[in-house]
Amino acid sequence: MPPRRLTLKQIPASERPRERLIQEGADSLTDAELLAIVLGSGTPSESALQLAQRILKECGGLDALSKMSISELRNFHGVGDAKAAQLKASLELARRYSISNNQDSERFNSSQTVFRHFRGELGSKHQEEFWAISLNVKNKLIAKHFVSRGTLTSSLVHPREVFQKAIRDSAAGMIVVHNHPSGDPDPSPEDRKITLILSEAGKLLGIPLLDHVIITKGNYFSFKESGLL
């Protein structure tokens, strides 16, 4: 006999997944309850929660569910194009977060690490971009921030804009990064001027500038390695 479908109005507010998430936090919900929120609604014979429970049971859990294609997700009774897309999008976000979280745990204790991390993001850009990296006391990434785009000048990269982000992050140190689309990583006179300004500002604020790394597609320049910082 199929399970009796309960409408949301028939379920006590304290037991509804969405209300529980708002009141108690996401970590208090089961996998099925979180999945029910993503699905949004059930079928004529099942609530969203019952549908989520059945999906997890039939596929064998979240790991198997995350590997399914849109067409495979549509094979579940009650899952059409819209629900399959919602499921796939939420699972893809979780996958990307996992990758990002693993990368962010890396220690930025060398210019080579900075180069490896940013080469794919900045190495092939056709315009200069300036980024700031906030680090904790163990040189692990707290956050990375886009600062500006365009040919670097001291007016384009102002210490106030750079260190405002570091202060907000409670950073213990900072590394700045930008790319040279020309392919030549050697610093320009303006690059040197900006580095000096940021270094002095970092000393005053107690957030030292640990390095300034210039990145190209296949090479990099480090102010620290070169003894200029």
Image (tube, rainbow, N blue to C red):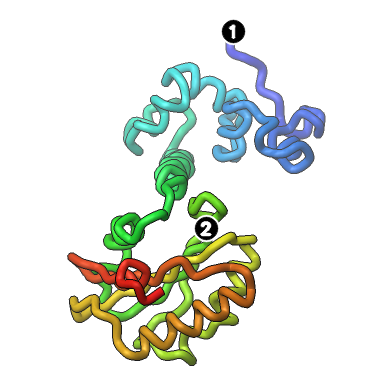
The C terminus, quarter of image: bottom left
Front-lying residue, 83 or 22: 22
The local secondary structure at tag 1 comes to loop
Disc 2 to disc 1, C-alpha distance: 58 Å
The local secondary structure at tag 2 comes to strand
Q: Is residue 118 left or right of residue 139?
A: left
At horizontal 60% and vertical 34% (from top left) the residue drawn is 34
> Residue 110's spot in the image, x, y percent?
36, 57
Report the disc number at residue 164.
none
Front-lying residue, 11 or 225: 225
- The image quadrant that residue 127 belongs to is bottom left
At horizontal 42% and vertical 55% (from top left) the residue drawn is 108
- Answer yes or no: is residue 85 visible: no
> Residue 70's spot in the image, x, y percent?
35, 38
Q: Of the residues shown, which amino acid type is indicated by label 2?
A: Leu
Q: Residue furthest top?
A: 1
Q: Residue furthest front?
A: 227
Residue position marked by numbered label 2 in the rendering = 135
The mark closer to the camera, 2 or 1, is 2
Report the disc number at residue 1.
1
Q: Is residue 100 left or right of residue 160?
A: left
Q: Of the residues shown, which amino acid type is indicated by label 1?
A: Met
